[in-house]
Image (cartoon, rainbow, N blue to C red):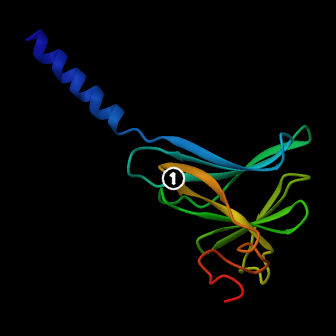
Amino acid sequence: MKVTILRAVLATTTLLLAGCGGSDGASYLVDPPARALSIVRQQAYYGSNWEMGLVVRNDPVCQRKHHLKDAAGNAKVDLYQPAPGAYILRQGKRWYVTEVSSCGFEPFKEEPQQPGELLGTFQMKADKYQFVAVSKEAGKEGNKPGAAPAGG
């Protein structure tokens, strides 16, 4: 009887732990180590959408976390730079702007006409969420991921 109860408790505990989600993130270093943009993700349980946030860090002035739209595990966030210290993020059809000096953040109501130079993408690669930089040629102003390269 005791063995049966113990097995039931162990099986239940294993199922509960297997249902747990996880957390991870990736960073773009603006001016290491004081300034960075990081996408952090947390999953309440396995199979659920990821709660996503942007952490803007400018030590010792400020550090703030801003909420992005919750997304599936393979969600990509593109990072553009229209001007020094200013960054535009694209998460699916949503666009956000942030600036590092005061850790400001605001969603766009419409897609920006010229988001600036594409720096790279926060994405899953080799089973890990990470920032993948683009080459200088692929990141020319106005280019978007998946667009044909400039010059043919």
Q: In which quarter of the image is residue 150?
A: bottom right
**Is 140 in front, or is 114?**
140
Total numbered labels: 1
Q: Which residue is drawn at 52% across and 55% down?
A: 125
82 w.r.t. 113: above or below: above
SS category of the residue bearing label 1: strand
Q: Position of residue 129 (x, y in %)?
A: 56, 50
Q: Position of residue 64 (x, y in %)?
A: 78, 46
Tag 1: amino acid? Trp
Is disc 1 surrounded by few (<14), some (14 to 19) or many (20+) residues within 10 Å? many
Q: Which residue is drawn at 52% across and 60% down?
A: 71
Q: In which quarter of the image is residue 18?
A: top left
Q: Which residue is drawn at 86% across and 41% down?
A: 34
Q: Position of residue 107 (x, y in %)?
A: 73, 68
**Is 38 in front, or is 15?**
38
Does residue 21 appear left or right of residue 141 in this picture?
left
- The quadrant of the image that shows the C terminus is bottom right
Does residue 46 appear left or right of residue 129 in this picture?
left
Does residue 74 appear left or right of residue 140 in this picture?
left
Q: Which residue is drawn at 70% across and 74% down?
A: 138
> Furthest residue to the top?
2
Q: Where is residue 78 in the image (x, y as percent from the top left)?
A: 66, 66
> Furthest residue to the left?
1
62 w.r.t. 16: above or below: below
Residue, disc 1: 50
- The quadrant of the image that shows the N terminus is top left
